[in-house]
Amino acid sequence: MSAPPPTDHSSPHLLDLLQTVHKNLLHQADWSSLEIHTSPSYPRPLITGLPPDPVYIDPDSASDYSADDRDALERKQQEWVLPVALREKWTLRKWAEVFDSLPEGFWGLNKEGVEKGKRLLLAVVSEDSTIVHYIVHDGIVKPRQN
Amino acid sequence: MTSSTPSITITPAGSTAAHPAPTISLSVTPVPPVPPRYKKPNYHVLHALPLPLTTTPLPPLIPHNPLSLLHIIVAYLFPGTNSHPSPLHVGIFHASTHAIHVTSQDTIKAFWNHGFFGKGSLSRSEPTWVIRRRRALGVIGLDEALTSEEVTERRRGERKEFKRERARAERERREKQLVEEGKIVKEADGDEGEAAAVVVKSITFAAVEPPSSRRKSLERPAVEVEDLEHLQLTLEEAFFLAFGLGVLEIKDSKTDEKIPQKDLLSLFRSHSYFPPHTSGLQPDDPFMLNYVVYHHFRSLGWVVKPGIKFAVDYLLYNRGPVFTHAEFAVLILPAYSHPHWDSDSLRKEGREKKPWHWLHCVNRVSSQVKKTLILVYVEIPPPPAVECANVSKILSRYKVREVALRRWLVSRNRD
């Protein structure tokens, strides 16, 4: 079996993946203020954008506010999106590298005034154009109350 | 709606009639406006053909009429209609998405309506992005030609509203209880204000107006919406349509030239890896494994769709996704029983063996969505078997075995 070529932040196949996810977020998921990040400071091309509805609600703030306030509180939160392919071999190291490259303090402070942990949306692209999203946190977070 | 209006004629009190008008106190409940109904397409007619091919049955054989045999022979030798479209449907292979894109509306209709091939690149299944876009821009009415995505969205919205209302009622009930028990003292004015707000809310009615007049009064912008969506065929679907049925011609996106049938297999096999492999193709390439299983179930009449959302490889629909939910979830497992693989511990140990808890996980997910899990074992032939150029010969070397799996609970199956 031939060894796969080393993944570079500007490899054409990663940029293709970026385009697919970008088009999907813009036209199907109705995200706004989408921006593409392909600078060498990131291990892989990334996308930031504003989702139409909050993608994640911090359980700490959830108990304090009523449902409407909570939506307003989280609405303005930009999210980082990491496009990956379904057929690609993914490792924890790759995740750690991406998290290390994300800016600190992007997600604001929590109730105790401590910076919230980093998080991103993993966009897994499959061949039939289905994109499955996962919320990934850098470390353990408080579970959501159902 | 005329059925709910009371059939009593009442002369107005101030009329000029000689007889005094009878005083009838009648409370007429306002008739809620009936939303305009848009008929669903008849799916049984729309999806009558199971594959994008036209078939014509032979004339019947009547034993006492020898001429009918002649009729059959003529119909057999000189078929009136061609089963295949002419020219063939065209799809474009894009290396950027590892898939085949179809943009011609006729081809999209043919592939989706007859066999449910492909997926709209900006939709959940059927390409409907342009309908949703036009509705968002106000080109078509609010309830016109609802797409499956919109139906789901409305249902979720209603559910969310119901839950919010339920939580509010629960909170109010709890507060009232506490006030009655004297545990908390509520400010009187705040309570009244809230109560008034509730009353106001409950007597708001939608304007009673026939829907036809409303639709006419709404001026619709005449915007031409460009369709940004395409039908995306996976490599397996495209290969089945091109090789299996012969109704699809595949062109390359870069050169815009037809890719010859003999090059398709190696192209698709190399693109079943990410990033694509240029050499070292194996008999257990993801494409070979998937295609063998795809072809197997398609030729048995199932509608096969990718099942990534349910953590499996394929979903099997009895007639198609518009009729029923998928009944079966297919998981593809390579089997290396051929003596050639005996010494290959990477495959024997690494890819063939799976832990029990893995199986339990997948099965739990499948039973949660009411699907029966089917493990499909594909016997992998040794590498020389897939070197030849004859695709049928290569495929005949693969063997498929199925195992259907269901969790059995002792306590629930006692009787």
Image (cartoon, coloured by chain):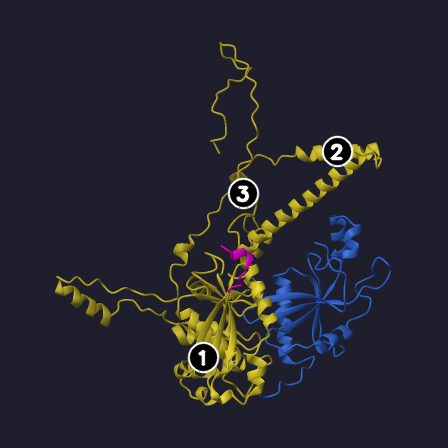
Chain colours: A blue, B yellow
Q: Are marks 1 and 2 on the same chain?
A: yes
Residue type at mark 1: give it. Lys
Residue type at mark 3: give it. Arg
Mark 1 Cα shell of 10 Å, populated few (<14), some (14-19), many (≥20): some
Q: Nearer the viewer, residue B151 or A13?
A: B151
Q: Position of residue B228 (x, y in %)?
A: 56, 64
Q: Nearer the viewer, residue B172 or B61?
A: B172
Q: Are marks 3 and 2 on the same chain?
A: yes
> Who's the residue at 55% across and 78% down the image?
B95
Give me the chain letter of mark 1: B
The image shows residue A13, relative to residue B204, as above or below, that is below
Give me the chain letter of mark 2: B
The image shows residue B239, relative to residue B185, as above or below, that is below
Q: Main secondary structure of the magenta part?
A: loop
Residue type at mark 2: give it. Ala
State the SS at label 1.
Answer: loop
Circles 3 and 2, Cβ within 8 Å, touching? The answer is: no
Which disc is residue B258 wearing? 1
Residue B351 shown left or right of residue A106 in the figure: left
Q: Position of residue B32 (x, y in %)?
A: 56, 35
The CA distance from mark 1 to mark 2 is 72 Å
Residue at mark 3: B215
Residue farthest along the front direction in this orientation: B415
Q: Which stretch did the figure color magenta?
A: B406-415
The CA distance from mark 3 to mark 2 is 36 Å
Q: Position of residue B26 (x, y in %)?
A: 56, 21
Q: Are marks 3 and 1 on the same chain?
A: yes
> Who's the residue at 43% across and 82% down the image?
B260
The image shows residue B299, relative to residue A59, as above or below, that is below
